[in-house]
Amino acid sequence: MDSEEYKTDTTDPLAESIRPHTDPDTFRPSVLKQTQGPGAPKGFVLGAEELIMGRSSDADIRIDASEISRKHLVFRKIGQEYACTDLNSRNGVYLNGVKIHSAILKDGDLLQVGGAVFLYREGG
Amino acid sequence: MEFYVKFWGTRGSIPTPGYRTKKFGGNTSCVEIRIGQELIICDAGSGLREMGLDLVTRKQQPPQGHFFFSHAHWDHIQGFPFFLPAYQSSYTFFVYGTSAEGVRVYDLLSGQMQSSYHPVDFSELSANIQARELSEGKTQIDGIEVDSYAMNHPGGATTYSFAIDGRKTIYASDCEVDAVLANREESLADPQAPRRLPTTMVDFFRDADLAIIDGQYTDQEYLDRIGWGHSRATTLVDLAVAAGVKQLAVTHHDPMQADDDVSRKIAACRSRAERLGSDLIVFGAREGMELKID
């Protein structure tokens, strides 16, 4: 089945869910929606290959709160997905309530960093 | 000494790739444990392939790797023929087993690479791969205490604990804990009833920081699969609470369970832990997730 066939069938939910999202007109980037903590509500578009989140003024995603380390975690792009890794932060990174060292983010994940909570929305 | 656990395969029975299993993953059992410089690999399901691809790119290479197999059913060995480091002479791997079974696991691992099943013969692998036997179910690897416990599964299965400096992780795949409950009939008739576990099993799991256990079925699913060798996920909560486990990773997800099904299974476990008055952390093991054991 080629991409043209995918485009012709928009009524089949399965076909729609696996349709390649390479069309720049329909492509949506992955985003982190901050729902709690300093500065919320706020959205961060994930586009770069690597992004640092932390309290530091030169962090790509800056969260100004004392419980957040200067460089708290890093997001790295792997294909169309993002992996997040704790940078030995003081208070850790929680994914859906579980303290993790690293994980590949999936749509709907809740990421907690200090008092800040983010909802991950996968692009595609 | 740093202690990490990473999930590379969390699915039971057969690989189930696809959009339904995107969150928890579709690869069969494989867990990586890194303690200091040592690399321990629990089971070689299809998740091992990805792990091998990752391993060869790492800046810090382990001096050797140690394979521990719960048992040799296909979903626990099928990744080995596609494990890239096995084809490289710079690697050494030890394959552990219990007494005579040690040789058996090694033989079955190599047996699946005969020409009838796989184009590359085991003897053609470049890595140094050796069978090792556990002595009375135990061994030590550079200060890491390894212990084992026989579990209820068709053909048998082995659970392992890895402990160092007061930190302990347990890998328990393919086990039907429900089959050895003292009040088995009662717990089937009334899923809310407490599940009475063998003391020896509780003692083995005692005070683990992380217990990774086969919880393939929901309470309802289990009723049609009694004797198949896998547990109700909710039974693991009782085990973990009784043993004072800090974190429970439910793994070996049923191939029929989509991500939402696994999430509901975990939610039921969390409700049970709450009802038992426990602060146990329960989560569904998922591919790519890595924990640091502090």
Image (spheres, rainbow, N blue to C red):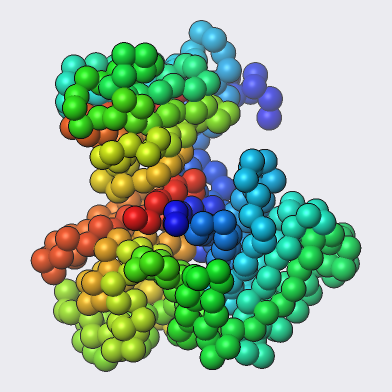
Q: Quadrant of residue B82?
A: bottom right
Residue extending furthest top?
A: A25
- Residue B139 position, x and y percent, is 55, 80
Q: Do we see residue B229 in this rendering? A: no
Number of numbered discs overlaid on the protein picture:
0
Viewer-closest of B168 and B113: B168
Compared to residue A53, the image places residue B145 above or below, namely below
Left or right, A2 with respect to B280, comes to: right
Assign the C terminus of chain B to one quadrant of the image: bottom left
Q: Do we see residue B251 in this rendering? A: yes
Viewer-closest of A43 and A101: A101
Compared to residue B50, the image places residue A114 above or below, namely above
- Residue B113 position, x and y percent, is 81, 67
Q: Quadrant of residue B4?
A: bottom left
Assign the N terminus of chain B to one quadrant of the image: bottom left
- Residue B52 position, x and y percent, is 67, 51
Compared to residue B47, the image places residue B135 above or below, namely below
Viewer-closest of A52 and B143: B143
Please name the residue shown 19% across and 65% down the image.
B272
Left or right, A76 with respect to B198, comes to: right
Please name the residue shown 64% across and 55% down the image.
B62
Please name the residue shown 49% across and 49% down the image.
B287
Left or right, B238 with respect to A30, comes to: left
Please name the residue shown 34% across and 30% down the image.
A72
